Structures are given as structure tokens and as C-alpha cells.
Image (cartoon, coloured by chain):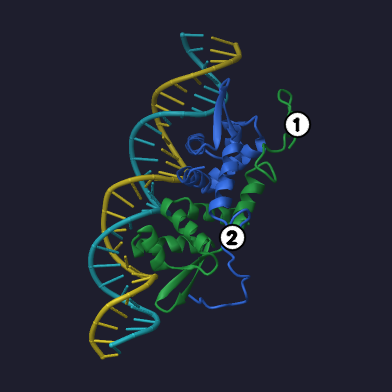
Chain colours: A green, B blue, C cyan, D yellow
Amino acid sequence: MEKIEAVTALAALAQDNRLDVFRLLVQAGPEGMAAGAVAEALDLAPNTLTFHFDRLRMAGLATVRREGRSMIYAARFETMNALVGFLTENCCGGTSCAPATPSKPARKRSKVPA
Amino acid sequence: MEKIEAVTALAALAQDNRLDVFRLLVQAGPEGMAAGAVAEALDLAPNTLTFHFDRLRMAGLATVRREGRSMIYAARFETMNALVGFLTENCCGGTSCAPATPSKPARKRSKVPA
DNA sequence: CTAATATTTCCATAATCGTTGAAATATGGA
DNA sequence: TCCATATTTCAACGATTATGGAAATATTAG
């Protein structure tokens, strides 16, 4: 995942209501969930919800499909996985989130291995 | 990690320059890095940098200490680790980022039966 | 003390954000 | 067809954001 995609995905999740929406979609699983059901579950106005869905979709974190009168939104797990991967690789020490690569052997403190 | 902390941390990382700053701090390791060094490395104005450092600190993603005339900023790996944990737990299927509730082994395409 | 360095604080500004209300669009049913 | 349902689009608004310039603060050197 590129940095710009990561920033967009992070921004998409960095909002109270939108994070709730995404969590709900995750819980709903791959089958997804109708916009109306999300609106009712989270008590959000339909137009506000459309705004948040758009953000999630532009960030690659959700997909839509029409089913009758309803729009069914579903989480894109692949993107979420890539985001977590990006954060782990780029914003953590390495595999786990440990202090990164001591460029030279630390003098004062001895580093705890693993 | 609470949801509100996660949102704050996500917002702190959801900005181009700030993500760069944090990544640099991660690379710098626990010893941290002087504000001026970050400014030079990323070509950012000192006041702009202070603004971004503040965000990172308020999100618990960085710490400061004074060393002579310099302010040394360091990444808070613990918070970053907690954030990744939050995302994995709450925004993914479970341990990894797999589709939640695989009630059935996902055939090619099945219409919603409910 | 004064001067230089390193960083922060203050004020201003354009841009973006999240929400609302009203109107528009799409679908399915009588 | 007309009507109800489901969702989107549009226009507007106050709030927040990221950045810039100028001035203030803290520390060290001379």
C-alpha cells in the first residue's frame, strides 16, 4: 500500500461516526448491510450517512451494490488488511510495534531483544 | 484502547506531513530526534512542525524532552501498538483482517437468502 | 549584560469537514 | 399510472485544519 492510500484510509477511519459505520460493516461481514439498516443502527441521517459511505468507498474501505431499493454497503477487508500492514511496516519497529532499528548500538540502554 | 483514543490517533496519522514526521520518529528510535533535525529532513517550517508535534503528542504518539536548546521528540511505540491492536480487534474479522462471521465457506456467489 | 540558536506562540487565512434541510432520483408495488 | 420506500444530490452553515509571517520565549555562548 502506498503512503497516499494509507493517509486516505486513515482519514476515512479518523472520525467518530465513520469509524462506527465501518465497524458495523465489518460485523456485518462480506454480505454487507443496507444503508437504511446502518442509519437505524447508528441513528444517523441518510444524507450524512451517504457522505460517510462515500469517504469509505473513496478510501477503498467499502463497496456498494444495489439490491432492490436498498444500497448494500460492505467492508473491504483487503484494504483494511493492507492498512494494518502499512502501519506495522512503516510506523512500527518491524513485525511488531517495537522500537525501531537502533542505528548504532545504544550506549546507555541495553536493548531488549524480542 | 478506547474508541476516542483510536480516533484521535488515527486523525494524528491521517495527514501527509504528520505521517512523515511520525515515521521519521519511528526510524529515529527511542532516543528520539531534535525538532530542528526533523524540520531539515522534511523541509517543514518550524511553526508548522510544532503544530504537527502537538497533534502527535495529544494523540499519545510522541513525547518531548528538552535537551539544551533543542526539543527532542520521540515516538511512543506503545500507543502505536495499541492502535494496531484496536484496528485488528475492532475493524477486522478477528486476529487477522479476514471477513467476519464466516458462517459458511463463501461460495463463488450466493444471493442473500434471508 | 548582549547575541545567536532553537523552538514556540499568536494571529490570520484559505481549504476542508461534518451536518442539516430540501429537493431529486431510483425502485417496486397497487 | 400514481404512490411509497430508499437513497442520493444540492446548497448552505459553523467548525476545524494546515500553513504562513511575525513576534515571543528559552537556552547557551561570549
- Residue at position x 36%, y 61% in the image: A48
Q: Residue B67: which numbered mark, if any?
A: none
Which residue is under mark 2? A79
Foreground mark, 1 or 2, reads: 2
The foreground one among C26 and A21 is A21
Q: Is residue A38 left or right of residue A87?
A: left
Numbered disc 2: secondary structure: helix
The foreground one among A60 and B36 is A60
When the figure is inspected, residue D11 is found, relative to residue B17, above or below; the finding is below
- The image position of residue A41, as x and y in percent, is 39, 60
On-image quarter of the N terminus of chain A: bottom right
When the figure is inspected, residue C9 is found, relative to residue D11, above or below; the finding is above
Of marks 1 and 2, which one's residue comes earlier in the chain?
A: 2
Which residue is under mark 1? A104
Numbered disc 1: secondary structure: loop
- The image position of residue B70, as x and y in percent, is 57, 25
The foreground one among A67 and B111 is B111
Q: What subunit carries mark 2?
A: A
